[in-house]
Amino acid sequence: MPAERETNMEIVSPKEGEKKLIDELYDSCLSKGTIDLSLYVEYDVKRGLRDSSGKGVLAGLTEISDVVSYDIKDGKKIPCDGRLYYHNYNVVDLVNGFRGRRHNFEETTYLLLFGKLPDAKQLEEFDNLISVYQKLSNNFTRDVIMKAPSSNIMNALQKSILTLYSYDDEPEDISAKNVLRQSIQIIAKMPLISVYAYCAYKHFKLHESLMIRNPKPEYSTAENILYMLRETGEFTQLEASVLDIALVIHAEHGGGNNSTFTTHVVTSSGTDTYSAVAAAIASLKGFRHGGANLKAKHMLEDIKVHVTDWNNENSIRDYIGKIVDKEAFDRTGLVYGIGHAVYTRSDPREVILKEYAKKLAAEKGRSAEYKFLDRVERIAKEVIAEKRHLFKPICANVDFYSGFVYDMLCIPEELFTPIFAISRIAGWSAHRLEEIINNGKIIRPAYKYVAEHREYIPLEER
């Protein structure tokens, strides 16, 4: 069946007959595609690469980062406040050391790529290299970003990254040295591509004025994002600092998250850098991964609408109960931003971002809203534990406050997940290099076949 076609920016929908055929084919697909969930237990299949307790199965080794949620005492696992390490440095210590400084995301990127913190000269040289590499040619901006804009900036970002392949003299060279060069270039260009793609979307899809601004070489990544996005190009020191720290804490999160594991999988096949990054972007786009911050923001907006008195904890508790019982919001039973696959007592990224959210809310006159979110966070953890009969600690994750922070920074919703990608490309690049340097085997997990074999029946006899 022909896919939906776009002609002169107008969508041509499939014909009625085609829709009917798709409905019939879907029914056939659905009837044959459902697997009995009890078979996962029977064959001891680690569904989602997780064991029965929900912990991810070991699929590789890494020295890049570590996620800690338990301490071992007397041979027993004791839930602890979450800890995140970048090359053995606690992220909390890094953030505390960064206070009052600029270019912290760049320094974090250097640490992730090279395994050590740079001295002043090394950081200056790396910043200069980022500034050189961040430039996009007028042809690329016009022919790739501005043409056929996407309403989802993650798709535009993926398309642009793939097209950079054609602008590279050595796109298929996967030696570690060349991949390092490609990685730094992509890290430098992703903020521009994302912002420019949003500007194109805003102009061609929303019919607003088109304005794009070249980045300033002396600005940090965070400063340039705010500078390029805003009509005035102005921002406060606190705004830039908050976005800079947000990029730092999103830059890496162990090898087991979906997009980083995707990077390892496709890299192990021997593919090129641009294809590997595009695959990671595709993974991050999903609402179960990078898109969760937007879902959390929409959920919180929904709670605000239905709870008129933000100070009434009983009303908050009742409505969150409806969300958990699948009676409100998107009726999935999920309270977005609450709970984490690894962390138990706390997510260190959420703790850090919450502190900065409080400061920014004070500057923006939105402290009442911050207090409301703090109240929702506390009550939601209690409601979920009670209704789901959980005995282990449950914590808020980084998505709970990130949407609120981005909204206070006047970052449009369309860029929430791309901002995540702009940050996480540092971790993806480090893991791609690690996979290449260690020359690992191609990653190919096994799947158990659970259907019965059948004999072929000739077409004329069916």
Image (cartoon, rainbow, N blue to C red):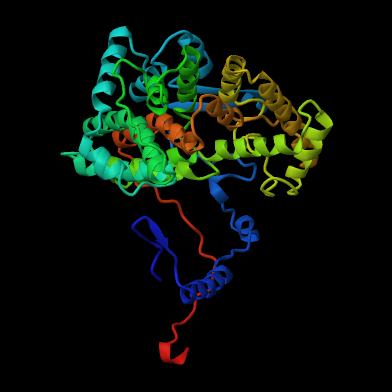
Residue 360 in view (yes/no): yes
Coordinates of residue 207 in the picture (x, y in percent)? 41, 43
Q: Note whether 343 is above or below 223 in the view shown.
A: below
Rendered residue at 51%/60% (across/down): 448
Coordinates of residue 151 in the picture (x, y in percent)? 43, 46
Where, by quadrant of the figure, is residue 323 drawn?
top right
Coordinates of residue 250 in the picture (x, y in percent)? 48, 28
Total marks shown come to 0
Q: Note whether 50 is above or below 396 in the view shown.
A: below
Rendered residue at 64%/45% (across/down): 52
Residue 341 in view (yes/no): no
Coordinates of residue 458 in the picture (x, y in percent)? 41, 88
Rendered residue at 71%/37% (across/down): 305
- Residue located farthest toward the bottom when viewing the structure as drawn: 461
Where, by quadrant of the figure, is residue 436 drawn?
top left
Judge left or right: residue 121 versus residue 447: left
Judge left or right: residue 186 versus residue 63: left
Judge left or right: residue 363 versus residue 104: right
Quadrant the N terminus occupies: bottom left
Residue sitting nearer the eye, 221 or 387? 221
- Residue located farthest toward the right when viewing the structure as drawn: 314
Q: Note whether 89 is above or below 60 in the view shown.
A: above
Residue sitting nearer the eye, 300 or 81? 300
Residue sitting nearer the eye, 297 or 422? 297
